[in-house]
Image: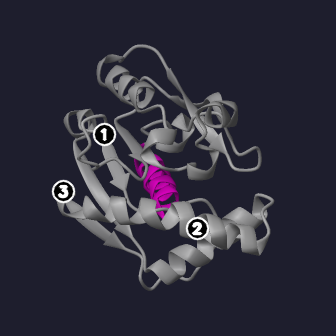
Amino acid sequence: MLGLAGPPAAGKSTLARRLVAAVDARLGPGTAAYLPMDGFHLANAQLDRLGLRDRKGAPETFDVDGYVQLLGRLRTERLRPVYAPDFDRALDEPVAAALVVPPGARLVVTEGNYLADPDPAWLPLRDLLDEIWYVDAPPRIREERLVGRHVSGGRTREEALAFIASSERPNARRVAAARPLCARVISAEDEPARSEPA
């Protein structure tokens, strides 16, 4: 299992999907599988209940225990498919069982902001993942992507910029602090800005 950590909109999802597609193209369909941490976002109803809606994307807005349990199950389950949640940006909600890891998968690529985070809640990931790579991009590029992402999701540009300042930047600083704990750094410095999920 390979983990891709990195700040919001660094390109983690794009890299993960490309790796899975390349492995499947070379070794056959179902050899690799994609599992994003974003599927473990708490539902908006729970964020509202907890008063965390304006912090969506912060560590406390994820079901980290559920994520750890699912990765642990992938370590032991060899005979049956394992279903996993995904995150729908149009709905701005997780969607249960939207993804599947087939029993023959030899590589699972998972990605998310906090895979290398030193907080005790996230530490079990280090024992479950074979390696964690850090995916990085310059703040200017990441924030252009984030604005596009939030505007596509229904926010105004001003609302998007305010959310980036209040939530995305502090999250990015926390993620960056764990960069030295990763085995490899993948840089997207020369990659053009885009608004697709990352």
Disc 2 or 3, which lies upstream in sequence? 2
Question: What is the spatial separation of the Cα atoms under label 2 and label 3, in whole angstroms?
Answer: 25 Å
Report the side of 61 relative to 116 (left or right): right
Three-letter amino acid code of the residue under disc 3: Leu
Q: Which numbered mark, 1 or 2, is in the foreground of this view?
A: 2
Q: Considering the numbered disc 2 on the image, is that residue within a helix, a strand or a loop?
A: helix
Q: Nearer the viewer, residue 34 or 195?
A: 195
Estimate how packed mark 2 is, as few (under 14), some (14 to 19) or many (20 or more) residues with alpha carbons within 10 Å. some
Report the side of 10 relative to 73 (left or right): right
Q: CB under 8 Å between callouts 1 and 2?
A: no
Three-letter amino acid code of the residue under disc 2: Ile
Q: Identify the disc placed on residue 164.
A: 2
Estimate how packed mark 3 is, as few (under 14), some (14 to 19) or many (20 or more) residues with alpha carbons within 10 Å. some
Q: Considering the numbered disc 3 on the image, is that residue within a helix, a strand or a loop?
A: helix
Q: Quadrant of the N terminus?
A: top left
Quarter of image, res 104? top left
Estimate how packed mark 1 is, as few (under 14), some (14 to 19) or many (20 or more) residues with alpha carbons within 10 Å. some
Q: Nearer the viewer, residue 44 or 104?
A: 44
Q: Which residue is tagged 1?
A: 1
